[in-house]
Amino acid sequence: MRESDTGFDPQATSGIDADDRQRRTGRDLLTHGGPPAEERIETLPIETVAISGRLEPNQTVTQALAGLVASAGCRGAVIEMRGGHGEPFAFVGPAESTDEEHAAWYSETRRPEGGARLLFATAIVGWRDGKPFIHCHGHWQFEGETVLGHLLCDETVLTEPVEVTGIGSRKAAFESLPDAETRFTLFTPRGEAAEDGDGFFLRVRPHEDIVLGVEAACRRHGVRNGTILGIGSLIGIRFDDAPPLAGPPTEVVVERGRIDSGRATLDIAGVDASWDQGVGRLTRGDNPVCVTFELLVAKT
């Protein structure tokens, strides 16, 4: 099934070459270490479970989130976190790759003295090697500086309560698996597909436009209106209402995502390899994925 308004098949890339993608995004693409996967947009329908609560201090972010999701009877979830403080607090940002295997990499780990105050973050709560694993992007504040990055949840310990809301699934989750295309180990939706689901987990692969990709996935599952949660990376960032970020590698957190009458809007915060930051609405059709983008869409 070809999606006429996106220009690509959401389930396969045969017949769509890199030059075509570059024309549609208007920017250079990155070279990943392995062959492109056939399936560019991976989805798994789920029955959603609303989650809310508080993460208590004196535990790592991983421990706190894993406990919260398990207590809700869920195997996986996407959780938004607001407020609170952590010490130690460890994070990285995007960086250009120094090898031929990867198209992007991470900065050196930053550990602010005295920790940091969490402003907002989104966490993908899933599994790796049979244990809970968290992929988390957000922004935080320390020493008068507000920074966006990739939180190292195993190394960050909460010192204050954190308020959380999110959406989970009892029978499905993101699992961290080796990815031949990017040479990273990445979250991929796995588990039992819901027959009458009211949402879905979604992974968008490199070089697909994130807004058009979300819309294509929503059409696949008959979602006309819904909420979108997620994080990922883009090749630079183009906004409707703010100056661009050059990239090429950037990391992104969706601060407000909606699908309304089949059209997606993603209001995001992002950071590039120079630690420049941007906040705004993504330009539709001009934001190709860098390494991966992981999301949850829930019908409303």
Image (tube, rainbow, N blue to C red):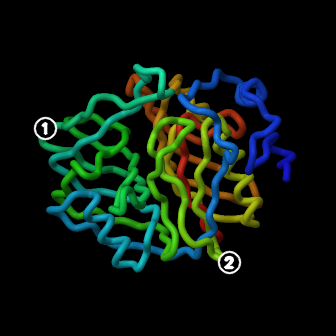
Q: Which of the two residues, 30 or 102, is positioned nearer the viewer here?
A: 102
Q: Which mark is residue 122?
A: none
Residue at the spot of label 2: 195
Report the amino acid beneath label 2: Glu
Q: Which residue is mark 1?
A: 113
Residue 124's quadrant in the figure? bottom left
Residue sitting nearer the eye, 217 or 126: 126
Residue at position x 53%, y 23% in the image: 246
Image position of 151 (left or right of 77): left
| Residue drawn at x 17%, y 44% as measured from the top left | 115
In the depicted structure, whether residue 96 falls above or below residue 176: above
Element type where label 1 sits in the image: loop
Work out whether 139 lies above or below 216: above
Whole-percent x and y of residue 122? Answer: 42, 54
Tell me what residue is drawn at x 53 percent, y 36 percent.
Answer: 182
Q: CA distance from mark 2 to mark 1?
A: 49 Å
Q: Is residue 5 above or below residue 190?
A: above
Q: Residues within 10 Å of mark 1 (few under 14, many from 20)?
A: few
> Quick one: SS at disc 2?
loop
Give residue 105's position: percent from left, percent from top: 41, 30
Which one is in front in this view, the residue at disc 2 or the one at disc 1?
2
Among the two numbered marks 2 and 1 on one chain, the one whose residue lies closer to the N terminus = 1
